[in-house]
């Protein structure tokens, strides 16, 4: 119970900022009227980044993975990183200000654009932008009204991580985390599974229902009418009885798999790779229902104090060596296809292993809005926030 209460308190702290950003609406026409930077100045000597865990490495955990030290020596820009465990936390931090860049997923990037927290990016000042995967160069979660609001960084899907001692065979369905059952080790999954501590996880429930209850007519897990949304909440309320912890801290989840008896959860390749590296009995799979995923964009704060260092980092961020190393470290897919070959850490099969060919099967995170393709309209994100907090609280 204490775990649930800690998760609930954390979510309540984020509710105000997250709801504010969501209720601003996706009024893209009003986002950032001022034009982008036209010329780089002298590097300011500092760079402050909000990032997902594992995204900005300087070799502290493993000396093989360091794409910060060389950048600092070359540019004189000292990199400072604030990690965030959820997109709502990223939005809250960017609303507070004091940061230059953020590695935002689609469920944060659109809110940041609509809320005027990020500025248009002049990709002509980023020569390597032309090498970014064409599927990402004008993706709808960062390219709005003909304007670029960031540089694609990495992408991937939310895998089902599982303990190979509890499962004789790889689980085929997300059912193992949504419905109570006896696992192959003869024990119930109750109290041994986890779910993501973020409102966007409602989309995972919707994706599962899309496959298992076709009568609901779900076409897009981020565009849910009232009936579809109600069904997703009912599934999540039932799951609440099974969940040992709602995770948002990757390192805590790793410890939970190692020491707290967790045997199945949505996760990232990052955790799976670290656990495998420690010879833990952990593997991952993308179930038959498919998976939600994230395509992350490096975005520039509207009031960035260090814009030249920020632009130098955005150029640095898409060099093939960094892209390949990060993909190997995080278990993600590089935004630059050239990174898929010739990287010693990633290997020539690394991109395929991490899902490069699965792009069309992934339901990428993005902010749910009321105006959607469903003629009935859709449930907007601010309700996802408040209702998911209620679920965490057992309501």
Image (cartoon, rainbow, N blue to C red):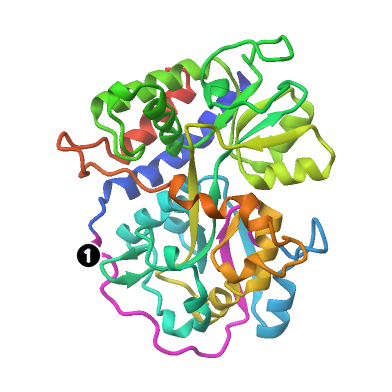
Q: Quadrant of the N terminus?
A: top right
Q: Work out whether residue 223 or residue 242 is closer to the camera in this orientation and state it.
A: 223
Q: Work out whether residue 14 or residue 174 is closer to the camera in this orientation and state it.
A: 174
- The reply, left or right, for residue 392 in relation to residue 22 is right
Q: Is residue 76 above or below residue 382?
A: below
The location of residue 289, given as percent across then percent down, is: 47, 32
| Residue located 53% across and 53% down the image | 357
Q: Work out whether residue 174 or residue 88 is closer to the camera in this orientation and state it.
A: 174
Q: Work out whether residue 393 or residue 275 is closer to the camera in this orientation and state it.
A: 275
The location of residue 104, given as percent across then percent down, is: 48, 57
Q: Quadrant of the C terminus?
A: top left
Residue 99 visible in the snapshot: no
The location of residue 338, given as percent across then percent down, is: 60, 71
Residue 366 visible in the snapshot: yes
| Residue located 62% across and 14% down the image | 190
| Residue located 51% across and 69% down the image | 100
- The reply, left or right, for residue 165 in relation to residue 324 is right
Magenta residues (range):
28-56
The residue wearing badge 1 is 30
- The reply, left or right, for residue 240 in relation to residue 192 is left
Residue 34 in magenta? Answer: yes
Q: Is residue 204 above or below residue 66?
A: above
Quarter location, residue 345:
bottom right
The location of residue 114, given as percent across then percent down, is: 30, 58
């Amino acid at each position: 119970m204490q775990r649930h209460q800690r998760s609930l308190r954390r979510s309540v702290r984020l509710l105000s900022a997250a709801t504010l950003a969501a209720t601003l609406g996706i009024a893209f026409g009003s986002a950032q009227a001022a034009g982008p930077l036209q010329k780089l100045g002298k590097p300011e000597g500092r760079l402050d980044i909000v990032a997902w865990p594992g995204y900005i490495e300087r070799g502290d955990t493993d000396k093989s993975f360091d794409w910060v030290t060389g950048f600092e020596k070359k540019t004189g820009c000292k990199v400072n990183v604030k990690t965030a465990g959820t997109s709502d936390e990223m939005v809250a931090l960017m609303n507070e200000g004091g940061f230059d860049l953020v590695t935002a997923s689609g469920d944060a990037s659109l809110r940041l654009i609509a809320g005027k927290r990020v500025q248009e990016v002049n990709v002509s000042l980023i020569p390597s932008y032309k090498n970014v995967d064409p599927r990402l160069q004008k993706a709808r979660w960062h390219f709005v009204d003909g304007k670029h609001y960031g540089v694609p960084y990495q992408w991937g899907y939310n895998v089902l991580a599982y303990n190979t001692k509890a499962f004789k065979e790889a689980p085929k369905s997300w059912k193992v985390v949504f419905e109570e059952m006896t696992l192959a080790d003869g024990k119930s999954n109750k109290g041994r599974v986890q779910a993501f501590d973020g409102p966007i996880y409602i989309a995972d429930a919707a994706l599962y229902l899309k496959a298992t209850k076709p009568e609901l007519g779900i076409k897009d897990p981020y565009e849910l009418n009232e009936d579809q949304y109600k069904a997703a909440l009912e599934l999540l309320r039932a799951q609440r009885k099974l969940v040992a912890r709602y995770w948002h801290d990757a390192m805590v989840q790793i410890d939970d798999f190692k020491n707290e008896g967790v045997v199945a959860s949505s996760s990232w390749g990052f955790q799976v790779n670290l656990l495998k590296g420690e010879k833990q009995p952990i593997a991952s799979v993308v179930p038959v229902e498919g998976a939600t995923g994230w395509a992350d964009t490096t975005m520039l704060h509207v009031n960035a104090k260090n814009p030249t260092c920020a632009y130098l980092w955005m150029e640095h961020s898409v060099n093939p060596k960094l892209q390949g190393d990060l993909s190997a470290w995080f278990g993600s897919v590089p935004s630059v296809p050239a990174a898929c070959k010739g990287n010693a850490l990633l290997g020539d099969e690394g991109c395929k292993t991490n899902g490069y060919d699965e792009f069309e099967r992934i339901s990428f995170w993005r902010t749910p809005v009321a105006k959607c393709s469903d003629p009935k309209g859709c449930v907007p994100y601010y309700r996802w926030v408040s209702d998911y907090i209620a679920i965490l609280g057992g309501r």
